[in-house]
Image: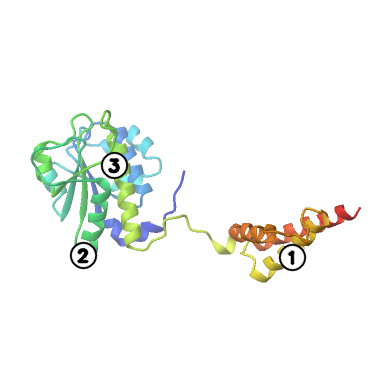
């Protein structure tokens, strides 16, 4: 499945970094790269990965599924401190409640706060920090972040794979940043590629069709012109909601003609 890539040129997306601390599974790193690129981001950092060549391993390459450029450009550091050096607002993504540490929020609140931070600070940079597959982030890791954020999940089973959690975080960030930058949220449509006749029908054509439709209903004795009640106003409301195209109006006019001919036999 592909997505609209219009946001990849938006500079604000380059100011978001995703940091995986001590990743041990190459497949999760590859899936994370795919998740990032799908949502228009590119900046992936690994802190002390289990394998020095984690991004080049076959499983990482396979699960990246076309996002190998993200893997190729991924930064690798020995400490979280190094990975967060240029970051001005870091969110520690964790499933566990912490008694100590930065104030918590949910991932949607984190995305909204990120958008506001990047809007208000020209040189601001955001980071989403994720921990290991088995144990998550340590208290020491969390202490290096300004906020804690959670993904609201089933409290009886809140276990998300690290790449899945990153995907959800990337989606929330994409949505918040796209709305803030007035970027399109839906795939763009090339108007030049639209077939002729697919444009909305002008009102005069719709009204002419409705008059033709009324004639057809009278011919079929479905509509009594002496006692029309509210049939035609309701029909008009129905077709107005449909936002008929020119082709559709022409097609329905043909149906009307056929109905009138059939009734006259």
Helix, strand, or loop for circle 3? helix
Give the x, y percent position of residue 96: 18, 35
Circle nearer the N terminus (2, 3):
2
Q: Residue at x 12, y 42 (%)?
A: 142
> Of helix, strand and loop, which one carries label 2?
helix
Looking at the picture, how far across and down is residue 184, in whole percent?
42, 59
User: Quick check: 237 above or below 140?
Assistant: below
Q: How far apart, in angstroms, are the residues tagged by discs 2 and 3? A: 25 Å
CA distance for labels 3 and 1:
57 Å
Mark pair 1, 2: CA separation = 57 Å
Q: Which residue is mark 1?
A: 211
Where residue 125 sits, quadrant-wise, is bottom left
N-term mark: 3 or 1: 3
Whether residue 150 is situated above or below residue 200 in the rendered picture: above
At a point 75% along the width and 59% down the height, the residue shown is 227
The residue to which callout 2 is attached is 120
* Residue beneath disc 3: 166
Left or right of residue 21: residue 229: right
- Is mark 1 in CB contact (under 8 Å) with mark 2? no
């Amino acid at each position: 499945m592909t997505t609209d890539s219009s946001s990849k040129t938006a500079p604000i997306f380059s100011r978001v970094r995703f940091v995986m601390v001590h990743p041990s599974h190459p497949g999760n790193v590859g899936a994370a790269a795919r998740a990032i690129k799908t949502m228009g981001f590119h900046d992936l950092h690994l802190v002390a990965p289990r394998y020095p060549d984690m991004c080049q391993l076959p499983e990482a390459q396979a699960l990246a599924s076309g996002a190998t450029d993200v893997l190729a450009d991924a930064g690798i550091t020995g400490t979280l401190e190094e990975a967060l050096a240029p970051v001005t607002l870091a969110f520690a993504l964790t499933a566990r409640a912490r008694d100590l540490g930065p104030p918590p929020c949910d991932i949607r609140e984190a995305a909204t706060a990120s958008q506001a931070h990047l809007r208000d600070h020209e040189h601001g940079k955001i980071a989403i920090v994720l921990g290991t597959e088995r144990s998550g982030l340590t208290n020491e890791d969390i202490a290096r972040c300004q906020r804690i954020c959670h993904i609201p999940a089933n409290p009886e089973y809140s276990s998300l794979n690290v790449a899945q959690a990153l995907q959800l975080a990337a989606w929330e960030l994409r949505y918040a940043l796209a709305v803030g930058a007035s970027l399109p949220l839906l795939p763009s449509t090339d108007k030049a590629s639209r077939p002729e006749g697919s444009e909305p029908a002008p009102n005069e054509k719709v009204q002419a069709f409705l008059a033709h439709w009324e004639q057809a209903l009278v011919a079929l004795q479905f509509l009594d012109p002496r006692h029309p009640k509210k049939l035609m106003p309701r029909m008009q409301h129905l077709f107005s909601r449909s936002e008929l195209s020119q082709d559709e109006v022409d097609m329905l006019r043909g149906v009307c003609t056929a109905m009138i001919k059939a009734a006259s036999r």
